[in-house]
Image (cartoon, rainbow, N blue to C red):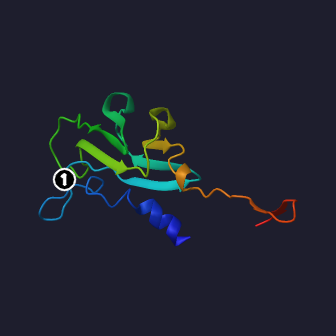
Amino acid sequence: MDDVFRSLRTPLFDSAAFAAPRMESGQATGFVPAVDAHRDGEDLVLRVDLPGVDPEKDVSVELTGRSLTVSGERRDEREAEGLREVRYGSFSRTVTLPQEVPSDSVTADYDAGVLTVRVAGVYSAETPQRIQVTRSGSGAQEQIES
């Protein structure tokens, strides 16, 4: 079971492009949305926390080869100065897919501040296919259940 999660983690999260940007002090810069990813059968599902973002104006999902990029901007429309712990600004998160997929296999849905991106069939080449074994011999073939 650990191998399934290890294969999900690699190469998706081991790339520098997926890592959150950091300043030298180790603190995050700007707005870096949290991303959860999991395998659902042969599909990859990404959940990106994007509260306060207008998905129609400020979010882009792009597929280029094996790279899937979610980018956009969380705008600060407040004019008052004061304490600001909420991060704003542009963001970009990229994952490397295990194989190329057609663009129509990628769907994106935004609901209640969460963008859900599904990449259908991206793990189809990794799903084992059972091969039937036959026995040949005295003129008749018998099927062997394996």
Q: Which quadrant of the structure image shows residue 76?
A: top left
Give the residue at x 38% y 56%: 12
Neighbourhood count class around disc 1 (C-alpha, 10 Å): few under 14, some 14–19, many 20 upward: some
Is residue 64 depicted above or below 84 in this figure?
Answer: above
User: Looking at the figure, which quarter contains the N terminus?
Assistant: bottom right
Residue 50 appears in the rendering: no
Residue 62 appears in the rendering: yes
Q: Nearer the viewer, residue 104 or 35?
A: 104
Q: Nearer the viewer, residue 110 or 131?
A: 131
Relative placement, left or right, of 95 versus 144 is left
Q: Name, please, the residue furthest toward the front.
A: 139
Q: Name, please, the residue furthest toward the left.
A: 24
Q: Nearer the viewer, residue 140 or 53?
A: 140
Instruction: Residue 86: give x, y in percent of width and height.
Output: 26, 49
Please name the residue that numbered disc 1 is placed on.
29
Instruction: Residue 90: give x, y in percent of width and height.
Output: 23, 41
Relative placement, left or right, of 93 versus 112 is left
Instruction: Residue 84: give x, y in percent of width and height.
Output: 20, 49
Relative placement, left or right, of 78 versus 35 is left
Relative placement, left or right, of 143 versus 60 is right
Q: Of helix, strand and loop, which one carries label 1?
A: loop
Is residue 24 depicted above or below 92 in this figure?
Answer: below
Give amino acid for label 1: Thr
Instruction: Residue 140: give x, y in percent of width and height.
Output: 88, 59
Q: So how many labels did they put on this image? A: 1
